[in-house]
């Protein structure tokens, strides 16, 4: 945990004093081994980043005074459209994407996605939020990603994707692609990643009709 993420319910008085318990308190006490007077990196969810000075700590809570003076990191200008992975994999993926600075994630059903995945507890709002929090703490960030569920491939590609492409070029991760995926610059981009086994030919054909470019990410610039 490189940053202690502060939530609205942590505030005691005004915006400059907080009380933490549970997982974050345990980390401060047992992992960081902080004591009164120590300063820690903190950030308010959805807001600024700064320092928290430990005022009191015991077996149940830690209290800190906080000064938040810096803006969070700049978000990655990328919308990731990801075929819904296995639930256990999804947890890790959400953390890693948050660390990388991705702020818009769309989970998509495709032919090779098991329908049972959509019933997994891993898709519950609180479970997803937990993974986002872990990622923000690692990245020293405070802005929660947005997530969208699309359970029907064709309606999404025909009705929603064209409007998104107007705002940023779309790329499909594909081993036979020859389009270079940009990794530098501030221009918005859309990246579609298929399931285990990849998109089926029909799906690739639909994406190409919507002007999505096939890209072998090994050739990213």
Image (cartoon, grey):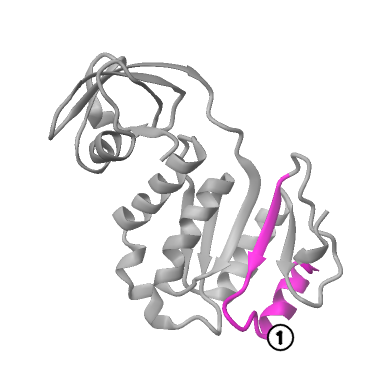
What percent of the width, then of the height, locates residue 188?
71, 46
**6 sits to left or right of 108:** left
- The residue positioned 31% from the left and 40% from the top of the image is 31
Q: Report x, y in % for residue 139.
A: 51, 40
Q: As rendered, which of 175 and 161 lies closer to the eye?
A: 175
Q: Position of residue 220 (x, y in %)?
A: 80, 58
Task: Give the residue drawn at x 37%, y 33%.
Answer: 4
Looking at the rendering, the stretch of residues picked out in magenta corresponds to 188-216
Q: Is 47 on the left-hand or right-hand side of 77?
A: left
Q: Which sits in the foreground, 86 or 150?
A: 86
Asked if residue 192 lies in the magenta stretch, the reply is yes
Mark 1 closeness class: few <14, some 14–19, many ≥20 residues within 10 Å: few
Secondary structure state at the residue bearing disc 1: helix
Q: Name the residue under label 1.
A: 201
Residue 5 image point, x, y percent: 37, 34
- Residue 191 relative to residue 153: left or right: right
Q: Taking 124 as reference, is 203 above or below it? A: below
State the image quarter where residue 116 is shown.
bottom left
Residue 2 showing in the rendered view: yes
């Amino acid at each position: 945990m490189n940053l202690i993420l502060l939530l609205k319910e942590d505030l005691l008085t005004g915006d400059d004093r907080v009380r933490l318990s549970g997982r974050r308190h345990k980390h401060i006490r047992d992992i960081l081994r902080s004591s009164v007077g120590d300063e820690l990196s903190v950030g308010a969810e959805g807001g600024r980043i700064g320092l928290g000075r430990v005022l009191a700590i015991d077996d149940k809570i830690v209290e800190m005074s906080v000064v938040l003076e810096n803006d969070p990191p700049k978000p990655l200008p990328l919308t990731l459209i990801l075929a819904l992975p296995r639930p256990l994999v999804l947890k890790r993926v959400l953390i890693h994407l948050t660390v990388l600075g991705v702020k818009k994630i769309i989970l998509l059903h495709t032919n090779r996605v098991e329908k049972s995945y959509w019933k997994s507890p891993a898709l519950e709002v609180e479970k997803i939020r937990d993974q986002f929090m872990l990622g923000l703490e690692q990245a020293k960030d405070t802005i929660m990603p947005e997530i969208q569920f699309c359970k029907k491939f064709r309606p999404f590609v025909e009705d929603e994707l064209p409007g998104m492409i107007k705002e940023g070029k779309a790329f499909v991760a594909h081993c036979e692609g020859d389009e270079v995926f940009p990794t530098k610059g501030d221009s918005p981009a859309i990246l579609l990643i298929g399931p285990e086994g990849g998109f089926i030919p029909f799906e690739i054909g639909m994406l190409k009709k919507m002007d999505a470019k096939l890209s072998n990410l090994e050739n990213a610039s």
